[in-house]
Image (cartoon, grey):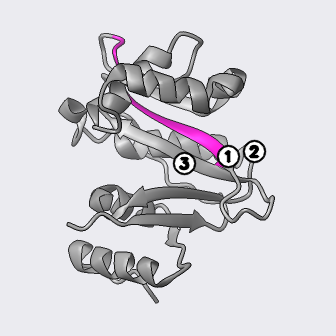
Amino acid sequence: MKRIPVSMVRKDLLDIPEYSLPNEYRIRLFEKGDEDNWARVETSVDEFKNEKEALEHFNKEFGPYIDDMSMRCVFIENKNGEVIGTTTAWYGDLNGDGEVSGRIHWVAISPEYQGAKLSKPLLSAAMNILANHHSKAYLTSQTTSYQAINMYLNYGFEPLIENQTCYEAWTLLENTLNRKILM
């Protein structure tokens, strides 16, 4: 599948779907020292070549905001206390107009735990955090992450169409997901 970047928006943070984690897992917030856990999980899903590169990225993007991370970065642990998933209920200026919105950022579940019904509870937890700070949210992804995009659509995120490439991406996603997305 052609990899095309996409952006999605959720116009409000009301009525967030709720999903429970399976009993053998728990959700917790970031604690100082979790940088290595974040780097390991993100590397496991091929976001980075290695954990050193991931940690460098973490320090550049989040290092100056480490206190925010303790309120906004969510982890899933397995029954042994090992971190196996993460996402960040971050913030940013999607349109460059100075308006800060919530952002679902860096969603990842370690490959050996994908399919274990962890993504929806993780996303619900992050969106509830966003709802405490923001009135709307956005995220960025790519067409190759079509399964995640399908979940985001089910959570009320909508395509952000800014140019012809966006139409190409969402038409490809409609065909791949076999669902009407563009109205």
Residue 70 image offset from top left, x and y in percent: 64, 22
Q: Tell me the CA gap for discs 3 and 1.
A: 8 Å
| Among the 4 quarters of the image, the one containing residue 6 | bottom left
Q: Which residue is mark 2?
A: 133
The type of residue carrying mark 1 is Tyr
Which residue has dot 1 on it? 91
**Furthest-right residue in view?**
98
* Residue 24 position in % (x across, y down): 30, 22
- Front one among 7 and 81: 7
Q: Is residue 52 above or below residue 171?
A: above
Mark 1 or 2, closer to the camera: 1
Mark 2: which secondary structure? loop
- Image side of residue 126 versus residue 75, left or right: right
| Percent coordinates x, y for residue 176 in the rendering | 22, 73
Mark number displayed over residue 104? 3
Amino acid on which the number 2 mark rests in the picture: His
Name the amino acid, label 3.
Answer: Ile
Q: Which residues are magenta?
A: 81-91
Left or right relative to 68: residue 73: left
